[in-house]
Image (spheres, grey):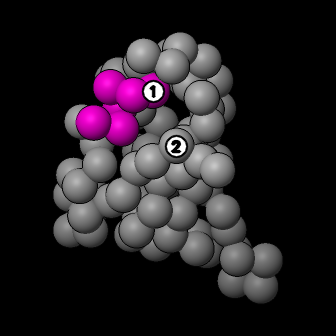
Amino acid sequence: MKLLVRNLARTTTEAEVLALFEAHGAVEYCTLVMDADTGRSKGFGFVEMPEESEANAAIEQLNGQRVHKNKIRVKAAQ
């Protein structure tokens, strides 16, 4: 299940996002969307979790959680 993670602080790293989601199950991949000009994070990314039940648990637990003072939003990617 592919998840969209929004409202990340620009300083949040892929490793930090990966650690958040690995606490809820296996993660196939994690990527932040980067600005081509500056090389900085655009504040959102995607996480792929192979088990739907684990992905749903991650959504339930992480949506609205504060990470680097930002309240992140997690939902299934469209």
Picture quarter containing residue 61? top left
- Residue drawn at x 70%, y 77% as measured from the top left: 35
Q: Nearer the viewer, residue 6 or 31?
A: 6
Judging by the rendered image, the residue that carries numbered circle 2 is 76
Q: Residue at x 45, y 47 (%)?
A: 75
Where disc 1 sits, the SS reads helix
User: Which residue is situated farthest in the bottom direction here?
Assistant: 37
Quarter of the image for the N terminus: give it. top right
Q: Residue 76, position in %: x, y? A: 52, 43
The residue labelled by disc 1 is 55
In the rendered image, the vertical position of residue 32 relative to residue 36, given as above or below? above
72 over 48 or under it: above or below: below
Amino acid of disc 1:
Ala
> Percent position (x, y) of residue 60?
27, 36
**x 32%, y 25%: residue:** 57
In which quarter of the view is residue 64 placed?
bottom left
Q: Is residue 36 left or right of residue 7?
A: right
Query: On the rendered structure, is 61 left or right of 49?
Result: left
Q: Residue at x 36, y 57 (%)?
A: 73
Q: Position of residue 63 (x, y in %)?
A: 29, 49
Which of the labelled discs sits on residue 64, or is there none?
Answer: none
Tell me the distance, in whole angstroms, between the alpha carbons under discs 1 and 2: 8 Å
For residue 14, say whether it is visible: no
Magenta part mainly helix, strand or loop? helix
Q: Residues within 10 Å of mark 2 (few under 14, many from 20)?
A: some
Of 72 and 31, nearer the camera is 72
Left or right, 13 with reference to 57: right
Find numbered disc 2 in the image and state the secondary structure of the residue it sits on.
strand
Dot 1 and dot 2 residues touching (CB under 8 Å): yes
> Does label 1 or label 2 sit earlier along the sequence?
1
Instruction: Specify start and end residues of the magenta stretch as a single range.
Output: 55-60
For label 1, count other residues whose C-alpha is less than 10 Å away and answer few (under 14), some (14-19) or many (20+). many
